[in-house]
Image: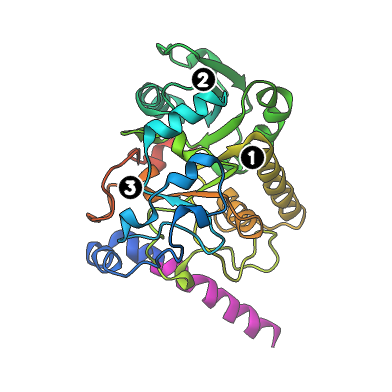
Amino acid sequence: MGQKMKNIFKLMLCVPITLCALYLISPSLKLIIGLLPMDKCSLENANMLNLDNSVDASLDLWSRADVQTCTTWKAAIIWEGMFDPDAYDQMHRREGSSVALTVFAVGRYLDAYLKTFLNTSEQHFMLGLPVTYYIFTDVPEKVPDIKLAPQRSIKVMKVEKNSRWQDVSMMRMKTISDVIESDIRHHCTHVFCFDVDQVFTGRFGSEALGDSVALLHAHYYRLPKKYFTYDRNPNSKAYMQTGDFYYHAAIFGGLWKSVKALTEACYQGIMEDKRNNVEALWHDESHLNKYMWLHKPTKVLSPEYCWDTSIIYRSEIRVTRLMWAPKYYDTLRTP
């Protein structure tokens, strides 16, 4: 009976992964997914939201009747056309908001992506606000020299290169938590954590700031929940039977206290899994989804904020603010 149950569990685990793989390689399936209806916001107006700040009350939830603009716990989901960018910028300048951007460029990822990431960030990310880039790399001397706007600076932090890319991804949680405690909390109000293999293409502004911010994964936001690739292994601390959305760990952020709490919890889950000889299905992303299920984000970013151009045209994506860079896994992830 024990072996039979193990086989059933393996089959259950493989179904969403197999469907996900088919989706990624099948243009026709992507087209069909794009036709699935989205849930809609149940609130009449933004005054009914659990507001992150006063300007959130100005969000026009029904300017985008084609998409879901709020969650069941009354957090806003930010789409183009819902907000006044000037109102957000003025409020955050008035309140003295400042942003730490963390990014890891380890091994070949530095040469492949970092310069473009930083240059495009200077064109689009939190313009008009103080921004400090925290760059974590194993080769600090190779960090490119970037021309920065006023009130923007770079801090380079040396980290060890792990032998497996999965460990680089997972162990960043501890590194981020540590640097928030030692440095960021003394200088910045907010933190945004990014993967380096991305390119800014449009405004990624202060409307994205909030207490706790998560991002809808571009490949999952239209899929039924049963196809979300949560970790289904009950032996993992990332185990989930269901959830709200599938969040992308390529971007997460919030007030420094919130990001510190998230990264600490994810790191603790990762380490407990290691002690039990378990590794979550999608590594730190699985742990992030578990945390966001238990501790709901106060603001959710639409897939505009991290879009993959391999997805067939979607009418609801009116702008792209950040895009996936080409992935060269075969060369970048080899020892």
> Is 1 displayed left or right of 39 in the figure?
right
Residue topped by disc 2: 130
Magenta-colored span: 1-19
Q: In terms of sequence position, does the residue under pointer 1 or pointer 2 come before the other?
A: 2
Alpha carbons under labels 1 and 2: distance apart? 18 Å
On-image quarter of the N terminus = bottom right
Q: Circle 1 sits on which residue? A: 259
**Measuring 57% from the left and 61% from the top, which residue is drawn there?**
73
Q: Which residue is mark 3?
A: 308
Cα separation between marks 1 and 3: 25 Å
6 vs 263, nearest the viewer: 263
- Tell me which amino acid carries mark 2: Pro
Judged from the image, the secondary structure of the residue bearing numbered disc 2 is loop
Which amino acid type corresponds to the residue marked 3 in the rendered image? Answer: Asp
Q: Residue at x 62, y 25 (%)?
A: 188
Give the mark toward the camera: 1 or 2: 2
